[in-house]
Every structure is written in C-alpha cells, then in structure tokens.
Image (spheres, grey):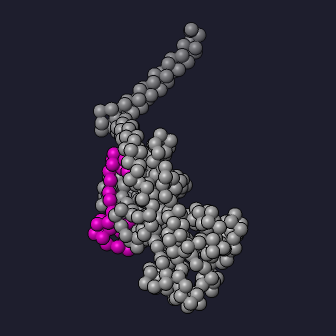
Amino acid sequence: MAVWALGINHHTAPLDLRGRFAFAVDQIAPTLHGLRQSLAGSASSHPAVETAIISTCNRTEIYCAAHQPAIDHTLDWLAASGGVSPALLRSHSYTLESGLVARHAFRVASGLDSMVLGEAQILGQMKDAVRAAEGAGALGTTLNQLFQRSFAVAKEVRTSTDIGAHSISMAAAAVRLAGQLFEDLSKIRVLFVGAGEMIELCSTHFAAKNPKQITIANRTLERGEKLATRFGGDVMRLADLPEHLHEYDAVISCTASSLPIIGLGAVERALKKRRHRPIFMVDLAVPRDIEPEVQQLSDVYLYTVDDLAGVVQTAQANRQAAVAQAEAIIDAGVQNFMHWMELRSPASQTGAVVPLIRQLNSQADAWRALEIARAKRLLAKGED
C-alpha cells in the first residue's frame, strides 16, 4: 500500500494563497468524495483509495493511501479546486511519501510543525479531520492506523516532554499586541466576530483583562449568546456589525466565511464616526474576514494570523531540549509504523506473513471440512 501527502502551510505559502485551499466543515465530505473519484479514475491509482483532509488557518493537507501513488494527480486536482495553476501550487507546497508522511503527521499532531510550538489545538483539529473522513467513508485501515499512531505519539510527546510549556498562544499574542497600543485594556470595548473555538480562546484571554465591554457578533444569535453569557457580554447579529463598528476599540475576527465580512468602506465610516481614534484589529480567519486594504488606513492597526508569528515564537528558543526529546519519540513511532506497513506488504520479505496466515487459515478450513465429512461418513456406518 502506498501512502502520500500533499500540503501547504504557513511555512510554504502566504495567507491569501492558503485561503484558496481552506475547506469549511460542510465542504469536507463532498470534497473527499470528489478527490476519491478523481484518484480512482487516474491511470496510476486504484479504486480502493483512502483520503483525509486537514484544513486549518495555518495548513491544508491531503493524506492518501492506495495501491499505487498518484502525487502529481493529487496536486493537479488540488490546484484545480483552488483555481490556481499546478506550477504555482507546486512552488508553495510539499509532497511526502512513505515514512516521511508518518514523520510529518506525527510532528503535526505533536505541535512541532505549528506556528505556536507545542500548541494542543492542532491535535483536536486532526481528530476532527479523521472523524470527517470516517463519516464520509474515505478512511481505510492504512490511514486510520497512521492517524491513530499520530495521536498516540502526540500524547507521549506531551506527557513526556515540556514541549507545550511557556508557549504563547495566538489568543495571548493578540492580547499582548493590544496592550502595546492601549495603555489600559480595562478601558476599551472589544468586539469578537464569530463564535468558534478560536474566538472562544481569544475572548477568554481578553476577559481576563476586564475590558469595559465585550460583544459577540455572530450569524446566529443563539450561539453568540452562549459565549457572551460566559463573560457578561453583549451579542449582535453579524448583519448589524457595520452600523456598530465605530463603537469598538478592538475587533478580533475569525469566521468560516469564504468572503471578507468587514470591508474597507465599513472601516472608513467607523473611523470617521470615531474622529479617527485608532482601531486595533486582528483577523485570524483563513480566508480573510477583513479586506486587506484596511491595512492602508493610518488609524487602523490590522494584524493577520501570519503577523502574529513573531510574537508567538518568542519563547521557542528555550524549548530546544524538549524538541529533541519529542523528535526521538517521533523517530520511534515512525519506525513502528513502517514495520506495520511492511508486515502488510506482500512484496516485502516480512510481508509474506499476512498472506501466509491467510493461506494457513484457508488450509485449516479445508482440513476441518474434510474431517467433518469423514466423521459424518463414519457415523452413517455406525463406526466410532
């Protein structure tokens, strides 16, 4: 069985390019179906194709398993889905095969490939991706083993090393940056756009600074109210945001919208009503929630998920010993996974074990049938 992976992440591709390949939760199942159909129809593949997609703010990765690898076909398919040329995608992506796939998956699950070294959020996102692939009927034995072993390695890394110690999260970085602009965070009004996990983390960090007002803007009031209630905040419909934008000193946005929801015109009108008092804005969404042209306004301090990289990496130099320990655990995990793959491969020397067991089972069934038939004949003759 061949295993391969294709991906783009914050190391290889700019934010706007990553945004072209971001898949919303409700897009995963049909996307997996389309990918499997495409791979099954390629000349170098086989109908029995396993696929999974991990799509986060920092990465989009496709994992595949089939009897023959089809890396180029996978890249062409992804390029077409994002509306870019294969050449452009190839220059900003990475492809992996065999043991390198396992090593990469284990590093991702353990937080070693994250913008925030050792962050735990990616592990939950990978588990969500596996559940989505399983629900879509796209997950087979090989990828299931790969991911389950990824989770086991990640657990060992987090319990055996200090990889997550003293890390600065994206949410904490946003608070730190806001503190550089505003002297007293308890005097500002903060607007959170969205009500997902990242906004929940950000609102928790900001709430610890006791801001003057917290408001959650969301498409559905019900979900927004649940989050606002936790912090004694207010809630508004997303459609009402432009009318009230000028009331807030800080805006943190992270939704699953495929198009920007805060435009240049809305921010310009808000600044005019504020008499050009500064607005601190953080756009953690991929694709962007806030039009990039907003950055050009002199009274707006807009940060994207990539802009926060320097802040969240400040404590990473002190954890190189933990990284080395984690890499050793990952090395052992990769060896174990490759050994498992070899045991299942008919082409390898040890791979003969699985066919041999099947052959012995078949032979045992045949002997059993012969013995049962013989016993019936003897009983019919009245013999013991």
Which residue occupies 42% across, 68% down?
306
- Residue 80 located within the stretch drawn in magenta: yes
Say whether residue 84 is visible: yes
Q: Position of residue 76 (x, y in %)?
A: 33, 66
Does residue 372 sit above or below 100 in this rendering? above
Query: Residue at 39% across / 62% down in the picture?
Result: 9
Percent coordinates x, y for residue 170 in the rendering: 50, 63
Vertical side of 31 occupied by 152: above or below: above
Residue at horizontal 52 percent and vertical 76 percent from the top: 280
| Res. 324 image quadrant | top left
Residue 357 coordinates in the image, percent (x, y): 41, 29
Give the overall secondary structure of the magenta segment. Answer: helix
As drawn, the residue found furthest toward the top would be: 384
Q: Nearer the viewer, residue 166 or 82?
A: 166
Judge from the rendering whether residue 139 lies leftward or rightward of residue 225; answer left or right.
left
Magenta span includes 135: no
Q: Which residues are magenta?
A: 76-104
Q: Quadrant of residue 72?
A: bottom left
Q: Which image quarter holds the N terminus?
A: top left
Residue lying farthest to the front in this orientation:
183
Residue at image point 38% right, 66% down: 78
Relative image position of residue 195 (x, y in whole percent): 61, 68
Instruction: Pick the residue in front: 367 or 104.
Output: 104
| Quadrant in the picture for the C terminus | top right
> Is any atom of residue 66 visible in this view?
no
